[in-house]
Image (tube, grey):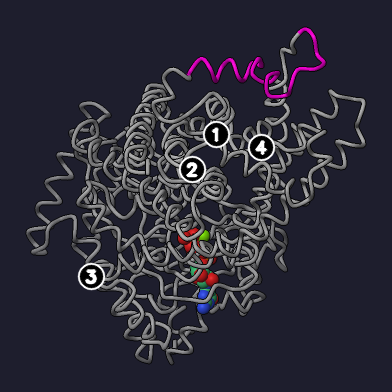
Amino acid sequence: MKDRPTVLLVGNPNCGKTSLFNELSGCRAFVGNYPGGVIEAARAGVETPDGPVELIDLPGVYRLGGASLEEKLAMDYLCRSGVRAIVSVVDSLNLDRHLYLTLQLWHFHLPVILVLNMSDEADAALLSFDIPAFEAMLGVRIVRTDALRRKGMEELLACIGQAAYRPSGYPAFRKPEYGEQTEQVLDFIAHTVESSGLPRQKEPFSYIAARLLDGNAAMVARYAEMGEEGRRLLEMIEDCRTELSRQMGLPAPEILSSKRYGLIRGLLEEVQGGDGVSRIRRSTAVLDGILTHKYWGIPLFLLLMYVVFFAAFTLGNPLVDLVRSGFDALGGWLAQALDGHPMWQSLIVKGIIGGVGGVVSFVPTIAILFACLSLLEGTGYMARAAFLMDRFMHKMGLHGKSFIPMLIGFGCNVPAVMATRSIESKKDRLTTIFVLPFMSCSARLLVFALFIEALVAPAYQSITMWGLYLFGILVAVVGARLLKSTLFRGGDETFIMELPPYRLPSPGAYLHSVWERVSGYLCKAGTFILLGVVVLWFLNTYPQPEQGGGIPDSARMEQSYAARAGKFFEPLSQYAGMDWQANSAMIGAFSAKELLVAQLGILFASPGEPDAAVHASDEEKRLDARRKISAHYTLPQALGIMTFALLALPCIATVAVVRKETGSWLFTIGQFAALNIVGFGLAVAVYQTAAVFLRA
Ligand SMILES: Nc1nc2c(ncn2[C@@H]2O[C@H](COP(=O)(O)OP(=O)(O)OP(=O)(O)O)[C@@H](O)[C@H]2O)c(=O)[nH]1
Ligand SMILES: [Mg+2]
């Protein structure tokens, strides 16, 4: 295992690395039609004809040497000692841009396999390549692949095996020719750095020289921090740069990149034939004319999101009722079966069936939501949403790059916080992390679904849900604006994101990603939530009053730990419309938002009062919990509670990941406090306003 040679998959975002990785390894890593789908390297053992290799799927990067975490991660892997070969994946239709990264790989002196992926699209565009000439000019082996239809996999495996196990017979990557003057300067810098006696860096000297010639800020800073000798070295290099820049008539940072693009142009003129404009790219242009239109692009996006919630509700509701009635029937049956064992009856029927059932019954809604979101992601529309929002977000002090984590946040805030790694500027990243919990995650959807179903007239249900999501985004955007003009001022970066063409996602990958999310939800309900529910049940049931018999369930519950905690906050929380029951549910919500629903399920569970449950008809039983909630709360209260659940109390997993990603307790605690203060303040505002307007 340890001495398996390592082979890296390197390429621009969205060129199909993960699709290839999955095909080669049989794994099921995440594939999405938007750049930045992979934020962490995936690895798997793969058998080649020459022996096993360890294949690593790196996050997509446009070039090496940037400051984003993905670029650092890619560099880190490239400099590791066990790496025997690099698979440079490029999109056949974007060679003019994608080969840039390939040329940078020369520095590592490793065998390179150039994979021209998306060969199906290249064929459709009547694009042809003179492969032998192409191979000879670069000094690589070239494999044409179509990852979706598994074409070229055998050949690729054979090349990987050869490069990793028999490198002596493998072509050597040809040194890109930058012209005599430039090369002399590069050699001089590399030699000066090598013989300077300064600490050895992990990158090859030729790479360091190229970065220093570019004036790469991070690399320059590294040497500047090495004391007097480092600074002397930089001064010497600066003289060469100035002189070269004068001779070439170009600013120093552009010398190498313009040379590389020149090389690529020349190369493609030799080896590429055909116009390269495919049907799919043409129809993409037409679709984009409509979907990313200056004026109706954003309204269209909002409309689409509305349709998603509408579908989740109208299609989901009857199914939710069905699942719920199943749980109620089970609860009723167990209540009878456990007659005479009040503690078990209470734990199982009220605690577990009421709590977990409350969470699981929303699976249909969640599944429809995930199915829609995955489809929008898979087709490439979500990347447009980020692009559309970019203009809008800029006005708010952020950029579209922050929007992708926000979209991910609709699913779950935890991976969303991790997805901010692609944001280079630290200040922008912290701002984004700060406001991310305002994105309504799928667990919060349950809270909304519960209250909206119970208290909002059917005609207004979807729009209320949609409004809550928008409200979350609005608060996030305003919050970001405030932070960017105060605490995290400055550090703006431009947003470059290649828009992928519209594609139909491959059915396997699509179904898999929906299933992954739904099963993740079910798993959570079966483990973490189940545990939480048992704890909640305990807090709701104990301490028991002295004389057990004769006291109604509700009165008994009012003495519980949960009720006491809820009542403790009631004097304050009542301004937001929250009574002690809602408060006690919020306490559970801190460990997972689903527990809020679980707790209300326990508090308002129908089979909890076995006598009533036994005599009620099925239909009555089914509607009981919801009816109790609608009888107990008013619409303004529901709005206050939902606002609080939307904005305040990020769950414990989010808090933990924020701490991990920012490395700062101060930030984590500050954010936690701020979210709660803002959430409570707005909940009060919403409740009070609604109470005035909805009184009639
Ligand atoms: N037509 C076609 N589509 C492909 C091919 N390979 C990948 N795709 C699609 O391209 C999109 C991106 O694929 P990924 O495998 O996620 O790309 P990636 O390079 O891993 O992307 P990042 O991780 O974001 O850098 C998906 O929609 C794939 O279905 C191919 O050979 N032909
Ligand atoms: Mg990927």
Which is more N-terminal, label 2 or label 1? 2
Quickly name the residue at label 3: 295
Quickly name the residue at label 2: 413
Q: Hey, what amino acid is under mark 4?
A: Gly
Which is more N-terminal, label 2 or label 4? 2
Give the residue at the far top of this rendering: 546
Q: Are dots 2 and 3 in contact, CB under 8 Å?
A: no
Q: Are dots 4 and 3 in contact, CB under 8 Å?
A: no
> Under tag 4, what secondary structure?
helix
Using the rendered view, name the quadrant where residue 566 is placed.
top right
Q: Hey, what amino acid is under mark 2?
A: Asn
Task: Tell me: 615 left or right of 383.
Answer: right
Quickly name the residue at label 1: 653
Q: Hey, what amino acid is under mark 1?
A: Ala
Which is more N-terminal, label 1 or label 3? 3
Residue 692 included in the magenta stretch of the image: no
Quickly name the residue at label 4: 601
Using the rendered view, name the quadrant where residue 159 is placed.
bottom right
> Under tag 3, what secondary structure?
loop
Residue 568 included in the magenta stretch of the image: yes
Which mark's residue is nearer the viewer, 3 or 1? 3
Residue 183 in the image, given as x and y percentages of width and height:
25, 60
